[in-house]
Amino acid sequence: MNDEELLSTAIAHLTSASVLLQRLVAQRAREVDVLSPTPDRSMLTKERMAFTIPEAADALRISRSHLYNLIKRGELTVVRLGGAVRITVKELDRYIDLCENG
């Protein structure tokens, strides 16, 4: 292969890799919306059934300690899946509705 053929082959490979990477990034962004600087209630979708404590705190834009206090006071209910503690999307929606409606 001469230099032009090598360069042409390298460009073709890089272009293919770039397209694959763009598709992977787009797919991952659809699966997990971590790229949004200000997640809002649209983050709480039916696709996701439950959040970890840090994820729920982040979704509500409160600290983890505040979230633990809400749980301790009974304002939010958790579910235990084996040893894992989760807060369901339904529970987060219920709490948000409660806050909105006083």
Image (cartoon, rainbow, N blue to C red):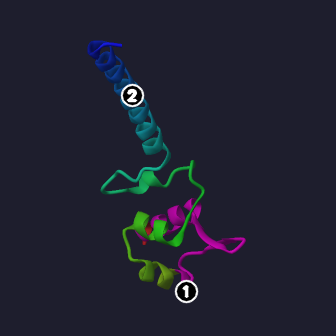
Q: Is residue 55 above or below residue 43?
A: below
Q: What secondary structure is marked by label 1?
A: helix
Residue 64 position by quadrant = bottom left
In the image, residue 76 lies in the stretch drawn in magenta? yes
Report the residue that reaches farthest toward the front.
2
Who comes first in sequence, dot 1 or dot 2?
Answer: 2
Picture coordinates of residue 102 (x, y %)? Answer: 42, 72
Q: CA distance from mark 1 to mark 2?
A: 48 Å
Q: In this rendering, which labeled residue sits more in front, label 1 or label 2? A: 2
Query: Is 78 positioned to the left or the right of 26 in the image?
Result: right
Give the farthest residue toward the right.
82
Q: Position of residue 95 (x, y in %)?
A: 50, 69
Where, by quadrant of the figure, is residue 81 drawn? bottom right
Mark sitting on residue 30: none
The amino acid marked with disc number 2 is: Val
Disc 1 marks a residue whose amino acid type is Lys
Residue identifier under label 1: 72
Q: Is residue 50 left or right of residue 95?
A: right
Residue situated in front as seen by the camera: 5 or 39: 5
Q: Residues within 10 Å of mark 1 (few under 14, many from 20)?
A: few
Q: Is residue 88 magenta?
A: yes
| Residue denoted by label 2 | 19
The residue carrying pointer 2 sits among few (fewer than 14), some (14 to 19) or many (20 or more) residues within 10 Å by Cα, namely few
Residue 59 in which image quadrant: bottom left
Q: Residue at x 66, y 71 (%)?
A: 79
- Quadrant of the image for the N terminus? top left
SS at circle 2? helix
Identify the residue at image location x=60%, y=69%: 86
The magenta region covers 71-100
Image: 68 above or below 7: below
- Image: 97 above or below 37: below
Query: Where in the figure is residue 16, as x and y percent of width and height?
Result: 40, 25
